[in-house]
Amino acid sequence: MSKTAAPPIGTLSGSLRLAVVRLNRRLRSQHADTSVTLSHIAAMNTLARFGPMTPGELAAHEKVQPPSMTRVLAALEDRELVVRAAHPSDGRQVIVALTDAGTTLVEEVRAREAWLSQRLKELSTEDRETLRAAIEVINKLVDS
């Protein structure tokens, strides 16, 4: 049994970057409103999934620095996709929640992402398992 040699790290990193860029580009083409970025959508998805939270909690969920989340929330607030409310127990903080328009946009994005779900269904079980394992590895790269 001969094993194929692993590609050099430089080749692997370039191939991974290219694959991620191409997938990102394809996913972006599925969403029509280009004024709402993927960072905006990610934050809105987190709010839809976990409910209202402080900007700091949202930044932690999204693994971004609080100033970055402040900019995201300002843009979403300008578009009336999120609303800020007083924190119930800490007057120094606010709670951020989706508006009805924000919830509608999240639902529309999820519907457009059906493209990816359909493409995943077309893969063999073995390819889907390989992809599941790759996602774990990618998350380790991101989280470290």
Image: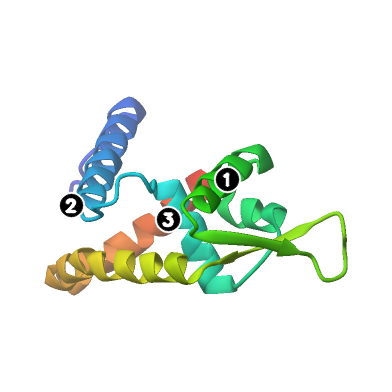
**Of residues 93 and 45, the one drawn nearer to the viewer in this rendering:** 93
Q: Amino acid at mark 3?
A: Ile
On the rendered structure, is 9 left or right of 70? Answer: left
**Mark drawn on residue 3:** none
Whole-angstrom CA distance, mark 2 to mark 1, is 58 Å
Whether residue 135 is visible to the viewer of this picture, yes or no, is yes
Q: Name the residue: 17% across, 73% down.
A: 121
Mark 1 or mark 3: whose residue is earlier in sequence: 3
**Of residues 142 and 134, the one drawn nearer to the viewer in this rendering:** 142
Few, some or many C-alpha atoms within 10 Å of disc 2 (few <14, some 14-19, many ≥20)? Answer: few
Few, some or many C-alpha atoms within 10 Å of disc 3 (few <14, some 14-19, many ≥20)? Answer: some
Whole-angstrom CA distance, mark 1 to mark 3, is 14 Å
**Of residues 26 and 129, the one drawn nearer to the viewer in this rendering:** 26
Residue topped by disc 3: 41
Whole-angstrom CA distance, mark 3 to mark 2, is 47 Å
**Quarter in which the C terminus is drawn:** top right
Q: Quadrant of residue 87?
A: bottom right
Q: Nearer the viewer, mark 2 or mark 1?
A: 1
Q: Amino acid at mark 1?
A: Ala
Whether residue 144 is visible to the viewer of this picture, yes or no, is no
Residue farthest left in this picture:
122
* Rendered position, 132 above or below 76: below
Residue 46 place in picture, x, y as percent:
53, 64
Q: Secondary structure at mark 2?
A: loop
The tally of labels here is: 3
Q: Nearer the viewer, mark 3 or mark 2?
A: 3
Residue topped by disc 1: 74
Q: Secondary structure at mark 3?
A: helix
Residue 79 place in picture, x, y as percent:
46, 52
Residue topped by disc 2: 1
